Image (tube, rainbow, N blue to C red):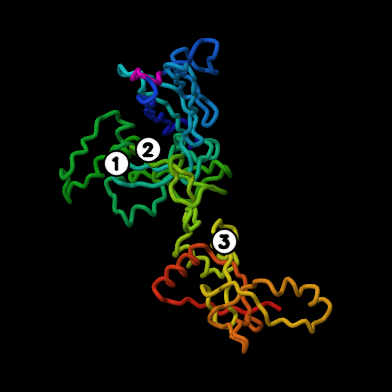
Amino acid sequence: TDGALFWFVLSVLEICQVLTCLTKCTNSRCFIFDSGGPAELPPNIDIDGFPPIGTRLIPGKSILYVYTHYETMEMTAVRYKDGEQIAYVEAISLNGSWSKACITLRLPRRPDIGDKYSSRHGQKGINSILVPADDMPWTVDSGIVPDLIFNPHGFPTRMTMGMMIEFLAGKSAALTGQRVDATPFQWTEEKPPFSEYADQLTNAGFNYWGTEAMMSGVTGRLLEAHIFIGVVYYQRLRHMVADKYQVRAEGRFDPVLRQPIKGRKVGGGVRLGEMERDCLLSHGLSFTLQDRLLGSNCDKVKMLVCSNCGGMVHEDLISDETITRSSSSIQQRGHSLARKVRWRCRLCSQTTSSGQVSAANNKLLLIDVPAAFRYLTYELACLNVQTRIAVKEFT
């Protein structure tokens, strides 16, 4: 239910440490937490350089603390950076130091889609949808609206029978007001654990097996199946989607391979690995795969490939002397440019009778390849392993 269930506050400790500058200052306390004076106070900062208790901090906008140079009185402000999570100042402690402080922040967290929950029997799962209380079903007899709807397909494989017994025990305890002894291994085949709780449900006017008829909150009609409903202890786990989600449009990349760096804290990208590539190929999305691996990535580079031998590491610049002056007028205008250097393949070039290298019949094509592939080609060339690509010129 999109209500007040599972709301909680996360406490985060921010350690603010100002480095001392012993080489420039005679005093060991070169930097101290101070605002430099009341006339230069940034917004929401006290004279001690810290925000007041209860201050609302907005990531990237609010100032977390201010420190001042001990001799030059130059003030520096440090902003609060923690993704997109709004926090509140809970406590500030200096612990007797002028250059190190501990700021306790309070982060309110409401239940979100993707957060993880679990019962006391290991029935873990994530929240797949948040439904308003008006759309939740309710019981016909008592009008109770459940807080959580559990998928029954989790029972056959995990075999958590204790949770089903807790359904009956919690429901009977809520009706009778009695404590339930949950000590294990006290039941037998002749005296099953559910019999006592089921009898108490029957005496209270409920179904023996704990099922009830419910009305749909969306259509207002009676549900065909009876729903197994009861009281179960559920807890919220520390795995929350607010701490795990990762998205990036552009950012830093590796200088060698030109691949996006990894890591959520440094703004890295999400890796499209071999298994993801296989999934795209199985769906026939070849152009999508090319776009993700080459087109829209930051590692697209150009390489010269010989159309004759397919080599990629044999290009060289030569002065081509094979073009004669008996050419058309267009070729004559470009004769001076043609006599200058041009690219050729060292393996496929021919030597003329005059001893000059000819590249008249040699064609090098400029293709787009990933930088990691180019790096692999150069590494293999260092091991005397030649890499060839079969290319043809577009007409």
Regarding mark 3 in the picture, which secondary structure is present there? strand
Please name the residue shown 63% across and 81% down the image.
359
Label at residue 120: 1
Please identify the residue farthest to the front as the structure is shown: 354
Please indicate whether residue 333 sits to the left or right of residue 27 in the image: right
The disc, 2 or 1, on the residue closer to the chain's N-terminal end is: 1
| Amino acid on which the number 2 mark rests in the picture | Arg
Q: Nearer the viewer, residue 315 or 264?
A: 315
Q: Report the mark closest to the observer, 2 or 3.
A: 3
Q: Nearer the viewer, residue 39 or 152?
A: 39
Q: Report the mark closest to the observer, 3 or 1.
A: 3
Quadrant of the image occupied by residue 367:
bottom right
Q: What range is drawn magenta here?
A: 26-32
Q: Position of residue 240 (x, y in %)?
A: 42, 41
Label at residue 300: 3
* Residue 300 forms part of the magenta stretch: no
Q: Nearer the viewer, residue 41 or 173?
A: 41
Regarding mark 1 in the picture, which secondary structure is present there? loop
Residue that label 2 marks: 236
- Residues marked 2 and 3 touching at CB (< 8 Å): no
Q: Position of residue 319 (x, y in %)?
A: 64, 75
Pick the quarter of the image with the C terminus. Answer: bottom right
Q: Position of residue 294 (x, y in %)?
A: 56, 63
Q: Position of residue 279 (x, y in %)?
A: 49, 66
Label at residue 15: none
| Residue 213 visible at all | no
